[in-house]
Amino acid sequence: MTSSSEGEILQVGQVIRERWKIKAKIGGGGFGEIYEATDVQNHHERVAIKVESSKATKQVLKMEVAVLRRLQGKKHACKFYGCGRNDKFNYLVMSLQGKNLADLRREAPKQCFSLNTAIRIGLQILNGIREIHSIGFLHRDVKPSNFAMGRTSQTMRNVYMLDFGLARQYLNAKGEIRSPRSAAGFRGTVRYAAVTAHKNKEMGRQDDLWSLFYMLTEFLQGQLPWRKIKDKDEVGRMKDDVDFTTLLEDCPSELHLFAAHLKTLGYPDAPDYTFLESLLNQVIVKEDIKWDDPYDWENGYDSVPNRSKTNGNLSARLKSHTTAVIRDQRNENRALDTQAPITMGEDEDEQTNGQVLGGGFESAHDKIEKPKYKRHEFLKPKYGTVNLDVIDAVNARFAACDEDRNNDVEVNFQLPSSILKDSPAIAKKAPINKSITLSINNRYNSNKSKTNKISSFDNTNAQMDDNSANNLRTAQTIMSKWQGSFDASCEEMMDGPIEETNHTRLNPAFPVPKVSLLSTPRSIDSNTSPGGGTPSSPMNPRQSPVQQRRASRSDKEKSTMHRTASCGPPQSNSIISHFKGLINSFNNLGVGSRLSRTTSIEEPQQQRISSSRQFSQQPEPDTSYGVGGGGGIRHSTSMGVNSRELPARTQKISATFNAYESPEEREKRRERRLRRRSVDSNNGKVVVHNTSVVHSIKPPHQNIAANDEEFRIPLEENNKPLLFYKRKRYQFLNFPRTSSTSKS
Ligand SMILES: Nc1ncnc2c1ncn2[C@@H]1O[C@H](COP(=O)(O)OP(=O)(O)OP(=O)(O)O)[C@@H](O)[C@H]1O
């Protein structure tokens, strides 16, 4: 134990909330500091207090509190006594436990436990993991230092699970498995993390159990082959290619079966905890282990065999195999990397080298070397180097942010008759109105049910998707890939109540039968332009690097997406352009553009009529916005299709956004737009009516690539390419930390 000193969050003798008096610092991990304290209001009961600085970039204590509260009453959870915050720190008060398993193993002469101890401890950990899974969470940092033995005579043989700072909810409020993100940052501790984590994939329940498997192996063998290896990716490759026969040499054969079961499990699969438990129980029976036997540390490690010696150097024996694999796979595995900063928990005892660290604290060296999680920053990509998986992860984040917010946007697309003619499937689905409704942000909930609220979880960092049924997962994933473009700012969503404003909820002007549109730009690209990069694609000339990467994804990747093209046959380029234009417009809105936009796309012969009827802006006094001073205009708000007044052949997409814009800004924008359009204007193809721009659409059979400009709804006022918006959207992820609130 170390006493707290200057520079640490709490000082010895300090009393928190007139109740908990700090006695000593007993631990300090990557995310906080642990102190022993006494409860001066309750017979000086000894408690543990975990604190994190309120200025810490990683605020994990709220998650810890949320999980620990839900675990109350479970056998392997500490008692929760209270929590709170002040301007300096956040704290969590819980029951004080004894030594953690990492320390206990290090104290053993050969850094390993007897089979007797390892299996019984393993069984308890298995049950602890089962408990946290039963409340809908993954631990994601299962490792020896996150399990401690009880401290009192009643609890000293019980294992307690600690540290829920990296926990993640895998069930939604309906008890359904949340859709996996196709990319997730590395979470956990390199030595014990499952291969899934190394691959930046969404972790499932089986991954906590893989960590238990590595723990058990280390308990028995005294080391893991990748113990000395710092490189996360290399460790991941070693785990992926490990020879289990060598790894589990001299271990009970049941451990092979343990691993074999885990290998059969994917993200959504429920592990067979009972089977795994029975495997460990078989060892207990086979080895005649008694539950009352002392644990190794209780009898001074007398019963610990010299396993490490009989096993020789496990790392060395496995090394030649894995090195060869590493060389072969190095390039291939680079594809697993995301551009986002990868952070990781570090090996807990890499520096111990077989020695026991006093009190089990991290050395200063550990602390310097230990990379810190950047929980909210890991998705922030470098400009221009975003890969698709990161985009998917971002979209998942956005999905998490829009929980129960009324920010859904619905757009009705009136399809050009030429397309309907070419696409009987669409025509069949929307026989009367020839419309497609695209629900934006209301992802996965085509029935618009909003029952996925997880109301009791407002005050934590948990990320919750409101995605629902498993059988919709494919569609959900697809929708998220596209619809992420429409999400509003996380900042806005996370920072307290949202007023439902017109610009966050746009209703269709005329409700029409809804048809889900599940084909993504990616699949559209592949349909219309195999390879995604042919010059004939109308999108191609302006494809951002992200789009190009998207288009050039390998066939293998594409096939694993199980894309659903519910719109039937490949669609005409013009409708794709319409959608893309709308996406771009929404992007503008999403990044907080103050532009007012009234845009119409319609057939040439109708453009003047419709523009005058439909798209004239409706100035209103600038009273309700109260920003930007007087003289601003609040524009009308509507989005949808209105073809009632128009002749039957007119097909149009209209989008009018409600946003503030001063007259000067509007005028400047108009001038810029005119400059941009001057060429086309000369051909009479673009008509500027008032402040509305009406673009003519060429019939699909014409060479639209050459006239791509015509098909684009104006983008941002500086006409930056799409990537600009993508980048802006990522910036939302860097939202300022919301201040935590006391839960006590
Ligand atoms: N309730 C407790 N009783 C006794 N010791 C505790 C308790 N909670 C934590 N500790 C000790 O503090 C150490 C670090 O705790 P914890 O894992 O919660 O912090 P952390 O900052 O998340 O650490 P890391 O990043 O290394 O996982 C534990 O290994 C354990 O030894």
Image (cartoon, helix red, strand yellow):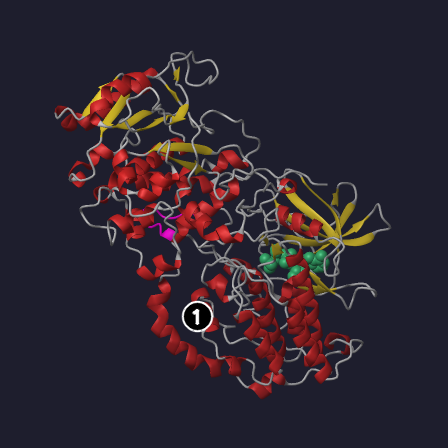
In the rendered image of this protein, does residue 67 appear above or below residue 430? below
Reply yes or no: does residue 36 show up in magenta: no
Q: Quadrant of ligand 1?
A: bottom right
Quarter in which the N terminus is drawn: bottom right
Q: Residue at x 68, y 65 (%)?
A: 359
The amino acid beneath tag 1 is: Arg
Q: Residue at x 31, y 31 (%)?
A: 716
Q: Is residue 619 left or right of residue 163?
A: left
Q: Is residue 420 left or right of residue 76?
A: left
Q: Position of residue 521 (x, y in %)?
A: 33, 45
In the rendered image of this protein, does residue 277 appear above or below residue 725? below
Q: Secondary structure at mark 1?
A: helix
Q: Main secondary structure of the magenta part?
A: loop
Disc 1: which residue? 237
Q: Position of residue 256 (x, y in %)?
A: 57, 79
Reply yes or no: does residue 386 show up in magenta: yes
| Residue 691 seen from this side | no
Q: In the rendered image, which quarter is residue 659 located in? A: top left
Nearest to the observer: residue 545 or residue 134: 134
